[in-house]
Image (spheres, rainbow, N blue to C red):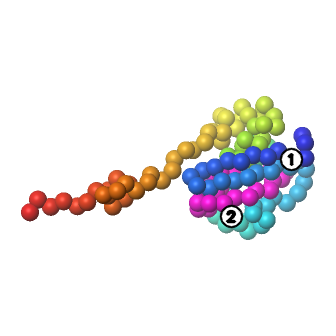
Amino acid sequence: MSKYIYSLWKRKTASAQVRLFNGKGESTINGRKVADYITRADLFDTVYAPLKACKVKDDVYFEVEVSGSGISAQADAIRHGLSRSLAGEDEGFKKVLKAAGFLTRDARKVERKKPGRHKARKGMQWSKR
């Protein structure tokens, strides 16, 4: 593996630039420790899910720059970026990650507001009398 594997991935309006390194080191998100940036346990598990699935959690570390959207979408973007980096490194990892569903991009976004409506689909209230 070269110095690091780079990938850029998105979820909703969050985008994560992931650099995956071999060896021991401190994993960071936006220059902060992962535990400091992500405080919810379920999102912590989401971020580390691809590393656990490939059984390389102790063998690699990562640096992530993430922006946009909320913390949940950012965690999903990081998971997707880590998965793509691992899949690019080893074909065996790709099979494991694909089976777990980590390589599929979730393209759902908020629908835009339409003119003449309250929200994207909610219309005006109508009264017959």
Determine which quarter of the picture holds residue 54: top right
Q: Is residue 18 left or right of residue 43?
A: right
61 in magenta? yes
Measured from the top left, where is residue 11 in percent x and y? 60, 50
- Image quarter where the N terminus lies is top right
Residue drawn at x 72%, y 31% as measured from the top left = 95
Q: Is 41 placed above or below 54 here?
A: below
Residue bearing mark 2: 38
- Image quarter where the C terminus lies is bottom left
Determine which quarter of the picture holds residue 120: bottom left
Measured from the top left, where is residue 105 in percent x and y? 61, 42
Q: Is 105 placed above or below 65 here?
A: above
Q: Secondary structure at mark 1?
A: loop
Measured from the top left, where is residue 10 in percent x and y? 63, 49
Residue 78 seen: yes
Q: Is 13 placed above or below 92 here?
A: below
Identify the amino acid type marked 1: Tyr
In front here: 52 or 123?
Answer: 123
Residue bearing mark 1: 4
Q: Which residues are magenta?
A: 57-79
Identify the amino acid type marked 2: Ile
Q: Is residue 121 left or right of residue 104?
A: left
Q: Secondary structure at mark 2?
A: loop
Residue drawn at x 76%, y 37% as measured from the top left = 87
Disc with the residue nearer the chain's start (1 vs 2)? 1
